[in-house]
Image: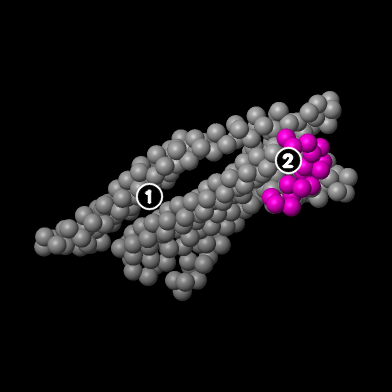
Amino acid sequence: MSLLVALTAVGATLLWFRPSPRHRLGRLIPSGRVVRSWAAAPVVVAIAGVVAAATLGLLTFGTAGGAIGLSSALVAVTVLWSMRRQRTASRAKRRTEDVVDACQLLAGLMRVGHVPSTALRIAAVDSAVFAESDAAQRVGGSVVAALRRQSREPGGSGLAELATAWEVAEATGASMTATLDALSDRLDAARKVARVVDAELAAPRATGRLLAALPVFGLLLGYAIGGDPGSFLLGSPVGQLCLVVGVALACAGVWWIERIAAGAGG
């Protein structure tokens, strides 16, 4: 019976956060103007998971179980969010590295006398970054459009500048050699700055995570000196409220530090 009620609560939450009609209509819009209606799906799943854990704990073990379920769910959501964010950031960094290397390769090929179309075809052999652009070029498509489409991916912003340079060269017939040299130098300098910023932000991020885990060591210390903090946290409504609020604040602290670090890192 408790499981049925919990599943009902999860279903109600999903229905409440269902995509709006405007978002569903976005699926019918051509690819250049598609609205990603399920961009908030991880948030909905996280909220549903927290509600389900709290409801199941409350119905099974009373208010103490509800407090434990809610706190555990908040910790799990924070850990999963942090891991997902770190994985996304790592992919973006690798993509940025690939874009910088690809632009340097293309600039080198043009510097030795290759025309842009030939240089792009040769560079695509060694760099997967230019695979889509080269394929578009081979079938008579727009290289500029392909580059701009790729630039919208995480870590691919440098390709937007390359697309602009390519478009100007196509329209005016101007040489791209000097422009690509300047672009590759700027992207390389930005990459070096990003590495320094990441190294400097590693310590604050580690400190924030350590501070979030300190309450656990505080509880262990309480048991070590002969106390019983668990009885207070689970044996009274005030303690249960303290448990939930404390866990929520610790999770919010981790989220806030990660947001600040991400903003500082650009």
- Dominant SS type (magenta): helix
**Distance between the alpha carbons at the discs numbered 2 and 1:** 50 Å
Query: Along the line of sight, which residue is nearer the eye, 85 or 115?
Result: 115
Who's the residue at 56% across and 62% down the image?
11
Who's the residue at 36% across and 42% down the image?
204
Amino acid found under the numbered disc labelled 1: Cys
**Residue 165 spot, x, y in % from top left:** 74, 31
Who's the residue at 39% across and 39% down the image?
200
**Residue 159 spot, x, y in % from top left:** 68, 39
Q: Is residue 45 above or below residue 159?
A: below
Dot 1 corresponds to which residue?
251
Q: Is residue 58 above or below residue 81?
A: below
Q: Is residue 112 left or right of residue 88?
A: right
Dot 2 corresponds to which residue?
109
Nearer to us: label 2 or label 1: 2
Q: Which mark is residue 91?
A: none
Q: Which residues are magenta?
A: 111-127
Nearer-N-terminus badge (2/1) = 2
**Residue 247 spot, x, y in % from top left:** 33, 52
